[in-house]
Amino acid sequence: MTSEIHGFCPPRFEPVRDQLRRNLAAGLELGVRFTLAVEGQVVLDLYAGHADRAATRPFGPDTLLPVFSVTKAVAALMLARAVDRGRLDYDKPVADGWPEFAAAGKAAVTVAQALSHQAGLPGFPEPMDPQLWFEPDEIARRLAAMAPLWPPGTASGYHPISWGYLAGEMFRRADGRTLGRALSEDMAVPFGLDLHIGLPDVQHGRVAEMVRPGAMPDLGPITEPRRVAFLTKWASPSGRSSADWRRAEIPSANGHATAEALARLMAVVACDGELDGRTVLSRSAVDALRRERITGQDLVLPFHLSWAAGLTRNDPAQRFFGPGPRSLGHYGWGGSCAFADPDRRLSGAYVMNKQSNILIGDPRAVGLIEAAYACL
């Protein structure tokens, strides 16, 4: 597939355009956008291709993409704002604000441990109706009652969907609003970010159609945490319409955004808490957000991972977010990603609607990020 590339590309970033052109020519993309920001200001913004499978609708600057687990990076920043305002404390037990969560041996699980996938709740072992994922109060009740699959705090085990209900319930109890509503009121509207957790019906027509990968990801040997997280019939929401999925607020999985909005939002992490000259997080809060909470072999994903409070940190052996040793961000199912480099005050995002089966470090995104760094 070849496609005209649109957007903003200063001459020094021509190698990035060349890399995107190669991806398109190789048939790796249907529709795609890649955006970089320095100090929160966009310095590169390229998009190409089509927003629908029939290739009749151009992929444009207003095309919204479901970004799946990149939503966790957005939610992590909102939790950091709650911490900054004294409504949550990373080092205090989740049960301080959510007493029911203390059940079944979870009384000591801290907010930071829950956000760094250490709580042992990657999904539900017993059968349930997958439509229950559309009922956040019921999911929160079940997570609060559940016994952990491993001793909390001893290892990370990626929580693909349940993480959002842990984060969302902690935020709601601390703030009084849902996380999606707070995102709109505190960040998206004030800063002009085309970013949503819980998409209003009026916006549904802007959403790109997704082409799912042709093969399942390689998780490695099937263990109980991996089975529970990914491989049951009820591991993720289903049984409802795509419109219901978009309307729902699932802070782990169903954010909708443009690459520009994600790149600008991640500038908060890259620029010590500031965006457009305004303080979004204090320096101490952004330091706490970025700090490593656990490192080691993840029990669900087949990777050695370093987790911050909801973000993945660059590992020395696996730098998925460019060469920056302090860079961090999040990938989403199919290849999307958003990242921040505090040393260069650089942030960026890659979104697309032709998904791959690469869990972390999709070569399309990695190639664009590496091409961009070579231009700096």
Image (tube, grey):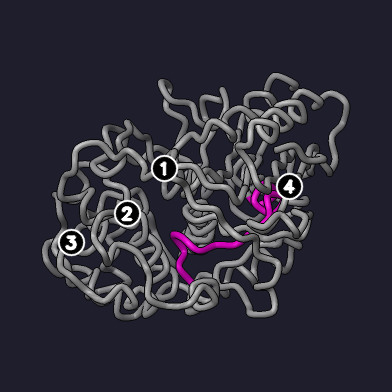
Answer few, some or many: residues within 10 Å of disc 3's Cα (few below 14, many 20 plus, some between 14 and 19): many
Please check the rendered image and state whether residue 366 is part of the magenta-colored stretch, yes or no: no
Determine which of the numbered discs, if any, sits on residue 49 in the image: 4
- Mark 2 vs mark 3: which is more N-terminal? 3
Q: Is residue 305 above or below residue 74?
A: above
Q: Earlier in the sequence, mark 4 or mark 3?
A: 4
Q: Which mark is residue 106?
A: 3
Sequence-earlier tag: 4 or 1: 4
Location of the C terminus (image quadrant): top right
**Residue 198, percent across and down?**
55, 73
Which is nearer the N-term, disc 2 or disc 1?
2
Please tell me whether mark 3 sits on a helix, a strand or a loop.
loop
Image quadrant where one finds the N terminus: top right
The residue under the point 18% across, 70% down is 127
Camera-nearest residue between 349 and 362: 362
Residue 160 horizontal side relative to residue 333, left or right: left
**Residue 104 image point, x, y percent:** 11, 66
User: Residue placed at 12% from the left, 61% from the top?
Assistant: 105
Q: Which residue is mark 2?
A: 159
| Nearer to the camera, 73 or 45 | 45
Are the residues flagged by discs 2 and 3 in contact, CB closer than 8 Å? no
